[in-house]
Image (cartoon, rainbow, N blue to C red):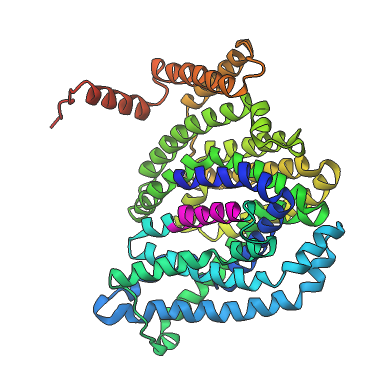
Amino acid sequence: MYLGLIIGFVNVSLLFPRFVGVDILGLTQWLTEYAGLFLLIGSFGTNTATIRFFPHFKDREQQHNGFLSFLFLLRTAGLFLTIILIILTKDQIIALFSDQKSAQYIRDYYFLLPVLLALTSYSELLENYAAALLRPRIATFFREVVIRLSTLIFILFYYFEWISLQEFIILFALRFLLAIGGLVFFIYWIGELHLKVDWSIFRKPIFKNVANYGLYSVFASLGSKITTKIDILMIAALTDLTATGIYTTMYFVSTVIVIPHLGISKIASPLISEGWKKNDLNEIGHLYQRTALNNFIVALLIFIGIYINLDHLVTILGSENFSGAEWVAIYLGLGQLVHVVNGYNGLIINYSPKYRFDLISKAITAVLAVITNYYFIQWYGIIGAAIATAITVILSNIINQLFVYLHYKIHPFSRGMLHIIGVGILAILLNHLLPSLNGIFLIDLIYRSVIITIFYTACLLIFKISPDISNLTLQLWQHFLGKHPSKKP
């Protein structure tokens, strides 16, 4: 994920705006997010259902009872319906764009939407199937690294005039073929590419369970998508694709804050699920607080790093278009911080007996996201979109947190969070006392970031704010010295 993050930063923040253009960045992101919206509908909820129901079909000798083909048939049927919907709504969608140049771009490349939808759909199907087989790393590698690396290569091809702009945009849409080809080969190589079709599945009781769960997942996922991505789609329609490209760049910067939270969620998910299986709320509550504190510590340090280097961020981006837009990253970052400090409330609800509340929560926040973005974008442009998205994320976490506490009497907050907030405030104050190295922005960025990181980490360890981080640091230090802590019986 971090390797993909580095490549993505180079693409979105450095190469794309300089070599291709901010407006084309906005166009490609609009195509991706709009296709993603239809992907949620056309998947028929098989994203989460794949992992949830695979154990019911798992039998390698029986080719998993045609599970892969079953998923393929559902996806294909969903694609057929959504592609028809995309074609029929073309004129209505283009009419939403107020900027004529942006509308013309969408008109010229609208034909790529069905292509992008189909490729991302089948790529996602194979990725979920690999995860159900407990082989998620290869799929993650293709999604996070290979696809982003191919984008980097296409940008360089365009820069050296080896391909035209139209060829670049088409290749951008076709890059998911790499993931599909790679995953098909990998699944075949491990002996799990089973193409058996078991038509009787549609008459079995399990199909009703899959359908019911899938229907719930469609609406819950759609609500989540609207909450987190509607800002990009609405900026393109209410302003132009250039503003969309600028916003996308700053949005990408803010996502660095939540990467640790997302990474640990891969570990926390099965532990929370196991806790519900045992109905052990004490175990869930303990995990809730531990992960929230540790993730918040890392997220706050990253946020401070972004805040103290705002001027340098604009210099790195190298375009006057980004002047003032750096505050988009700050407002979005504040929303991400609130999301991290509230811990895994969404996972706790999803794995609980009351998982259907997640749909109610997402419906409320989706409506709020559309309304706030509509007005705030018109009032304050892309900064308004960032404020609207931050408000929506904060409200979503408040709703989920209240629900979890009222029903299960657990929460993620601890005294250590107050301590780390105090350390964060001191770190920001220290930054203002550091002399500025005018004209040598890279050296200023490095020395400022190093000093603040050392101060932040030292306070963290001296005051033992996080037992987990303190113990890990001690173990690493002892390992470095060649000492091994004695194991207690």
Q: Which residue is drawn at 78% across and 52% down?
A: 371
Question: Up-down: is 317 above or below 105?
Answer: above
User: Is residue 197 found left or right of 12 in the rendered image?
Assistant: left
Residue 99 occupies quadrant: bottom right
Q: Position of residue 304 (x, y in %)?
A: 58, 26
Q: Where is residue 122 in the image (x, y as percent from the top left)?
A: 50, 71
From the viewer's side, name the closer residue of 204 and 283.
204
Residue 156 inside the magenta-drawn segment: yes
User: Is residue 325 found left or right of 423 in the rendered image?
Assistant: right
- Residue occupying the far left of the picture: 489
Residue 366 visible = yes
Which secondary structure dominates the residues rendered in magenta?
A: helix
Instruction: Pick the quarter of the image with the C terminus.
Output: top left
Residue extent of the magenta highlight: 142-157
Question: Up-down: is 415 above or below 364?
Answer: above
Q: Position of residue 300 (x, y in %)?
A: 54, 29
Q: Which residue is drawn at 81% across and 43% down?
A: 381
Residue 364 visible = no
Question: Up-down: is 388 above or below 93?
Answer: above
Residue 96 inside the magenta-drawn segment: no
